[in-house]
Image (cartoon, rainbow, N blue to C red):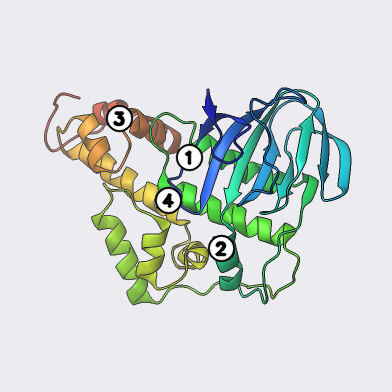
Amino acid sequence: MSTSLIKPHLVRLSGSGEGLGHAVVERDRELGAGRHPVAQPPVGPSAHILAVHSGTSTNLAWSADGFARRERFHRGQSLINPAGWACRPRWQEDVELMLVALDPVWLEKLAAEAGLPGSLEITPSFRLSDPFLAMMVERLVLEYEQPGPADLLYAQSLVQAVAAHVIKVSAARGGPDPGPSAALPPRRLAHVLDYVHTHLGEPITLDTLARLAGVSPSHFGRVFRASTGHSPHQYLMRKRLDRARAALIDTDTPIAVIAEVCGFADQSHLTRTMRRHLGLTPRALRATAPRAGGAGPA
């Protein structure tokens, strides 16, 4: 069993580690009242923590700064513990939680980029019922539970979306609606797309694409979709599949090598992705499509 990077008294079942930079994502188990393996810290966390209940229904007693509540939590309900806000959660029984820890400095920057005035203050939320937020967190956690490495661009995009939603539902200040996003200028879009096509076989990050586009990471997803009709992750995956499909049809290159040069974690990752998007495995595609290079080993 591993110790949680987010809350040391939890048992980590899966997670991102520190590879996301501004966030940590985990699926953890919190033991019921009186069964914590280590004492809970007397001070609040250094990060804003979003916890989504992902197990069977149970009761939670929550106390902090003279504030106390006791409620029954159901799957998908969540709570937000702001940085520095010391709380004492006591679950009636062992629970499974999906946690996202967000760096306060980065979240403040994200809010400023969205045009929100003043200093950002995240307020505590208890027993929040937000199916959209729970769905995004679950997708983020599942990305780190699939076989092989997580798709970094996809995970970063989800973290951006989760963070923006936390600001929307929990920030103690108002701000203008950012409204519809304009498309990228053609030259900048061409620069981004050229980079994607040139580096399909390498890890591609949201920060890198945003820098090439000359916009902030928080805005990049919106302006890229406005320009192409696809999210960055969707576009990247489509181009990787297009390249893999062409290589399978036109060459005798082993499938494992094609997977690697097209940016997939391994042959199994390519197989799962191709089956999901095209309805065929790489081997089936190669067997049914005529190829310029003739038949060869897979």
Upstream in sequence: badge 1 or badge 2: 1
* Residue 8 against residue 50 in the figure, above or below: above
- Hey, what amino acid is under mark 2? Val
Upstream in sequence: badge 1 or badge 3: 1
Viewer-proximal residue, 161 or 91? 91
Choose mark 1 or mark 3, whichever is in front. 1
* Residue 120 against residue 28 in the figure, above or below: below
Q: Where in the figure is residue 246, as x and y percent of width and height?
A: 24, 43
Residue at x 53%, y 35% (from the top left corner): 142
Q: Residue 16: give its label.
A: 1
Viewer-proximal residue, 129 or 125? 125
- Hey, what amino acid is under mark 3? Gln
Upstream in sequence: badge 1 or badge 4: 1
Residue at x 38%, y 62% (from the top left corner): 209
Q: Residue 153: give its label.
A: 4
Q: Which residue is identified by label 3?
A: 267
Q: Where in the figure is residue 76, as x and y percent of width and height?
A: 72, 37
Q: Which residue is identified by label 2?
A: 105
Left or right: 112, with 213 as reference point: right
SS at badge 3: helix
